[in-house]
Image (cartoon, rainbow, N blue to C red):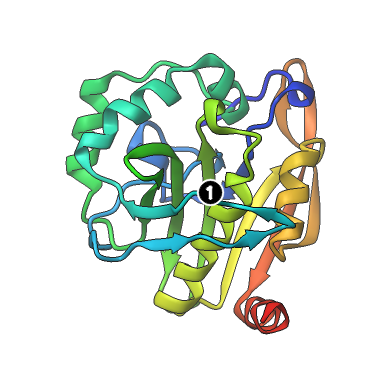
Amino acid sequence: MRRYRSFMRSEIILCAVRTIYAYSFGFSRHYYRLYALIQIDAHATNKEQYHINKIFGGKTMSEQLTLRTFELTDNEFIHGLINNPDIMNYWFEEPYHSKTLIDERFEKEKNDPHTRSFILTNGEESLGLIQLIDIHYVHRKAAFAIMIDPKQQGKGYSSIATRLAMDYAFKTLNLHKLYLYVDEINEKAIHVYEKCGYQTVATLPEEFFVDGSYHNVIVMNMYKRDYEKMIAEEK
């Protein structure tokens, strides 16, 4: 999913995942993948849910937020998001995805062991899509991606969803590292990731072509040891 239009006017939190084989919803193959999402999975059960009702970033979240398994019935929600030009411009992708194709790809890839996909919810309300992509069980690493529904932005959900995904990656999957790629001028996304403990490790100059010009991309990593240290300091 790819294409930003106006970086300065959006609150969409984006990260880019560099992968050759993993591809979001299987719509197309790309060497680079820009994500504001996390994809489909059948391996996490409905019991594998993460709840949060705490103070985070100085703001009390009275709602109970949950990561639950991505289901076929969620495709209607996703169909609306990925055909929204304002969202897809931030994914460097044409907003042209049929519901039939989404359903077909779900059935084809639902048993992919290298992906974990969740819907972020508040009660029965869907807030966004969260993914761990290209999970490597030898090197114990995965790409992180997130998309929050534009109607739900500005409420602090992105930070909490990022932390919940880290909990799952490091506590359940026992991963060693999460990584992401983000546009250099996407300051809001970078701020969220830094608040959650991600650190910049590199900058790729002129990596993506957006609205007539090339944009630099920042590579960010989060290691399990740093996550555990952060959790211990918060107690």
Please report the residue visible at 29 percent of the width from the left and 47 percent of the height from the top: 70
Please report the residue visible at 28 percent of the width from the left and 62 percent of the height from the top: 44
Q: Position of residue 84 (x, y in %)?
A: 48, 17
User: Which amino acid is tagged 1?
Assistant: Ala
Name the residue tied to disc 1.
145
Please report the residue visible at 38 percent of the width from the left and 21 percent of the height from the top: 80
Q: Is residue 72 left or right of residue 86?
A: left
Q: Is residue 43 above or below residue 80?
A: below
Q: How many marks?
A: 1
Q: Position of residue 165 (x, y in %)?
A: 50, 61
Q: Which one is in front, 231 or 172? A: 231
Q: Position of residue 114 (x, y in %)?
A: 35, 61
Q: Is residue 158 left or right of residue 81?
A: right
Screen quadrant of the C terminus:
bottom right
Q: Secondary structure at mark 1?
A: strand
Residue 143 visible in the current orientation: yes
Q: Quadrant of residue 228?
A: bottom right
Please report the residue visible at 76 percent of the width from the left and 15 percent of the height from the top: 212
Q: Position of residue 146 (x, y in %)?
A: 53, 45
Q: Is residue 8 above or below residue 146?
A: above
Q: Is residue 74 left or right of residue 95?
A: left
